Image (cartoon, rainbow, N blue to C red):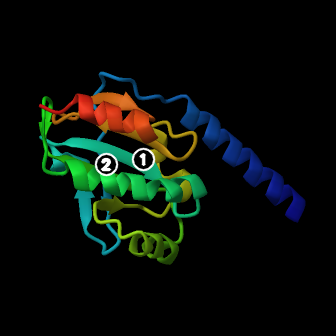
């Protein structure tokens, strides 16, 4: 019986993954709205950051490459949060965690002193946001302009730094 349940769960997960992989957001499209709770329970909408250049950072506290990337994101945030851009005023990071353990998520936020917006529905890979954005792997990010238009996808390290620099006024 346990074997049947495990096989059934594996089938459902593979079906969900296949369905998620068919939805890909393209550069030039409007980023779908995200409205998720912060670690303290307040719902924060992506649209509340309108007029700013926003990096939507999809990550998980259980994802080693995601956690490793946090100090570099912190540098970018500190450097550009009050900058003027050709396509927005100010820079924000909207961290969307695909976690399922709130304490673990909060612990990483505290450890790395992440002071930009953080949200999660704690639904792991079954989060509707993962489906809406076609997330296939982590870390993954999308850069949007002040009007919510996707201007770049999945940039990391120097590539991300250069993309943000190019947007400066």
Across and down, in percent, residue 94 comes to 31, 52
Number of on-image labels:
2
Q: Please tell me which residue lies in front, 12 or 125.
A: 125
Across and down, in percent, residue 52 comes to 16, 43
- Crowding near pointer 2: few (<14 within 10 Å), some, many (20+)? many
- In screen coordinates, is 11 left or right of 27? right
Q: Quadrant of the C terminus?
A: top left
Which residue matches tag 2? 34
Q: CA distance from mark 1 to mark 2?
A: 7 Å
Residue at 52% in and 64% down = 61
Q: Please tell me which residue lies in front, 68 or 127.
A: 68
- Dividing the picture into quarters, in which one does residue 150 lie? top left
Query: Do callouts 1 and 2 mark residues in contact (Cβ within 8 Å)?
Result: yes
> What number is the disc on residue 9?
none
- In screen coordinates, is 15 left or right of 154? right
- Please tell me whether mark 2 sits on a helix, a strand or a loop: loop
Whether residue 73 can be seen here: yes
- Please tell me whether mark 1 sits on a helix, a strand or a loop: helix
- Crowding near pointer 1: few (<14 within 10 Å), some, many (20+)? many
Q: Please tell me which residue lies in front, 5 or 85.
A: 85
Which residue matches tag 1? 129
């Amino acid at each position: 019986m346990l074997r049947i349940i495990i096989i059934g769960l594996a089938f459902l997960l593979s079906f969900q993954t296949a369905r998620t992989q068919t939805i890909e957001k393209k550069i030039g499209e409007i980023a779908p709205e995200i409205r998720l709770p912060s670690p303290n329970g307040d719902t924060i909408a992506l649209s509340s950051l309108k007029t700013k250049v926003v990096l939507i950072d999809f990550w998980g506290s259980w994802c080693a490459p995601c956690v490793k990337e946090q100090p570099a994101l912190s540098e970018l945030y500190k450097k550009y949060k009050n900058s003027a851009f050709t396509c927005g005023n100010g820079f924000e990071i909207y961290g969307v965690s695909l976690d399922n353990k709130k304490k673990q998520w909060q612990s990483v936020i505290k450890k790395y002193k992440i002071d930009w917006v953080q949200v999660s529905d704690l639904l792991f890979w079954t989060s509707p946001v993962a489906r809406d954005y076609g997330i296939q792997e982590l870390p993954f990010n999308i850069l949007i302009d002040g009007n919510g238009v996707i201007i770049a996808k999945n940039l990391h390290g120097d590539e991300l730094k250069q993309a943000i620099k190019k947007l400066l006024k």
